[in-house]
Every structure is written in C-alpha cells, then in structure tokens.
Image (cartoon, helix red, strand yellow):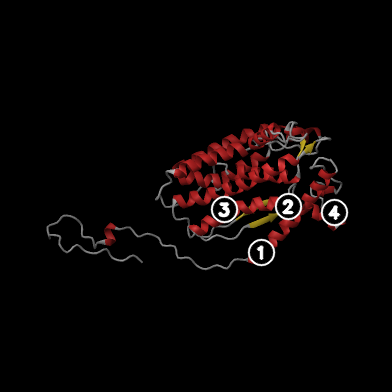
Amino acid sequence: MLGRPPSCSGAAMSDPSPPLTSTAEYYRPMPVWVPRARKQRYWLHALLLLLAVLTTLVVGAHMQDNFLRNQPVFSLNDDGLFSFFPIGWAFSQPSRLLLGIPFAGTLMLILLAHEMGHYIYCKRYGVFATLPFFIPAPTLIGTLGAFIRIRSPIRSRTALFDIGIAGPIAGFVVALVVLVASLGLSKPLLAVSDIQLGYPLIFELMHRLLASSSAANSAATLPLFRANLHPVALAAWVGMFATSLNLLPGGQLDGGHIVFSIAPRAHKFVSRLTILILLPMAVYFWAGWLVWAILLEISSFRHPQVADLPRVSGWRIWLAVFGLIMLILTLTPAPFAHSSLREVVQGIRTGR
C-alpha cells in the first residue's frame, strides 16, 4: 500500500495549486500483483525430460546407425506407421539406444540452453516461471521442443525484451558451437535420402569456411545437398531451425515479444505482415508455414500489457538488430525438399 505524500506546510492559503494530500482526485490507483507461492511439479518436469530423452535416443540411434553404414541419415525403416520413428527397431536390441547419445544429448542441450536463457532472465527480473517442459513426440527428431510457463506479469518493456531475446541468443550460440565442431564430420552422400533438407544461410557460410580450410575432408568440398550430415550436425540444424521459428516477429513467439517491447503499437501490424509473408511461403516452399501462420493469427489478437517505462533503448536496440540477423542466418524457407503446399496437393491428387 502506498503511503500518503507529505503535505507542504509552507504553502499559502490562496495558492491555486491542488493540495498534495488530495490523492483520491489526482492520483490514479495502480494495480498491485501479490505473488502467491505455487509448487513446482518437479515430477512432471522429470518425467517429460526422461520421455524426451528416450524418444530422441530412438531417432538418434537410427540416424547414427545409418551414418555408420554410409546410408542417408534420414533413411526410413519398415516399422509401418512408425517408419519415421523406429521404436520397434530400437527396442529389438535395447543396446542400440546407446548409438543415439550424440544426437539426443546435443539436441537436448540446445533446447535446454534456449529455455534456460528465458528462465534465468525471468529470475533476474523477479518473474515467476516454471522450469522447462520438454515435449516428447514420435517425430523425425523425437521431440516437439520445450517451453517454460510464465506465471506472473512482466513489469517493464526492458524486462520483456531481455527475457524474450535471451532464449534465442543462448540456443543460437550453443547450436553455432555444435555446428562448427560437427559439420566437418559429415560424409559424402552415396544414395538419395528419403527426406532431403534445405539449409539456412548460417550452414552455407560455415560450409564454405570449412571447404576453404586446409583440414577440409571430401564431404566439405561437395555442395551441402550432397553431404550426409553427421547426427550431431543434424542436431545443430534442428537448433537453428527452432531458433528461426521462435524469432518470427509476431504473436506470442519470442520475436513477437521483442517487437512488442520495442514498439507495442506496431505489434499487431507486424504480426499480420508476418502472416501475409508466411502464406505464400507455404504455397511455394513448405506447407508447414501455413500452420505457423494460423498459430500467429490465433496468438496475435491481444498481447499482455506491459508497463511502458523504462523503454527499450541504447544497446538493446543493437541487440534487437542482432536478433534480426539471427533470424536471417537461421531461417530456412524450404526446410524440407518437395514439401510446398502446391506439391503436397499435387501429390494427393496423383496418389503419390
């Protein structure tokens, strides 16, 4: 509760200025958020983490097995509906799961770095946030990522900016280190892969840098689409892709929070502009952009209000520019070949 401002005893009776004690008329009440302790469900975090480790080990083991046999990393197996998630193959010999440690460990580290970037800055600004929730899933990479839940208001635009950008920077830095260390481990692709990847600009730049070095191997001198990525390098690819998705400037994504912290009134416009850009990208590059356009539309109706002061300025503006550079470096318009909406519809019509 705010105390009453001190009165000014030396003021004359005829002074037209309003008395400082008339708080009801001249001071608007401010809402005060009183934190209520909520228990962390540590068992749930631990369970989801263990399941995510297991699912990423399954796909990582198959990737590593393919790589060691000079097969494309994304060669699918004969597990029927689970051809892209070889759980039957993995558990037919449980020791095979050990092969998945390089991919699973690297991917989980990148995801953890991203979420802990958010979490640490939440703690710094006194914002109540949960530990990361990892999402296990029978997908090509064994997970749908991770997230934290923020359970209290963010009190300023600078706090929103710092919390929003800390995650992408942390994840990007770890993924970049992994990329530098593992891209040179790739091999020449000897067969056509069932799933062909597209590569972001950061991969192209690092590949050219590696090809120009004296330590370049035979795979480094080939175009990226003819290289069989080492599973650890593939984890870096996933990390870069996740960074670009989070940095999309709109809605409740990290990029949307960054935009709102800098220019709240422009948030809805930028969100709609991003959606308009994603729609043709879905038609010509990757059908998945349509899903992200829908998610942005749903989450961009109303951004939670944040106190206007202090405003984002100075070095944070340059950090926002770096965030834009990260988006440009990590964005892959066509992350998977032959997956545009046009090609998907055509494939359905022709029965392919």
Q: Nearer the viewer, residue 145 or 190?
A: 190
Image x and y of residue 84, in percent: 79, 46
Q: Which residue is mark 2?
A: 104
From this view, report whether residue 13 is shown above or below residue 103: below
Answer above or below: position of 324 versus 128.
above
Q: Report whether 290 appears left or right of 323.
A: right
Q: Nearer the viewer, mark 1 or mark 2?
A: 2
User: Residue at the location (60% across, 51% down)?
Assistant: 114
Quadrant in the rendering for residue 223: top right
- Spatial CA distance of label 4 from label 1 is 26 Å
- Residue 117's disc number: 3
Q: Is residue 172 left or right of residue 348?
A: left
Q: Gap between marks 2 and 4, in whole Å?
A: 18 Å
Element assignment for label 4: helix
Q: Is residue 27 left or right of residue 166?
A: left
Q: CA distance from mark 1 to mark 2?
A: 20 Å
Badge 2 amino acid? Ala
Q: Which residue is mark 1?
A: 44
Quick one: SS at disc 2? helix
Q: Cβ–Cβ below 8 Å for labels 2 and 4?
A: no
Q: To which residue does mark 4 refer?
A: 88
If you read the primary sequence from the N terminus, does the residue marked by circle 4 or circle 1 appear first?
A: 1
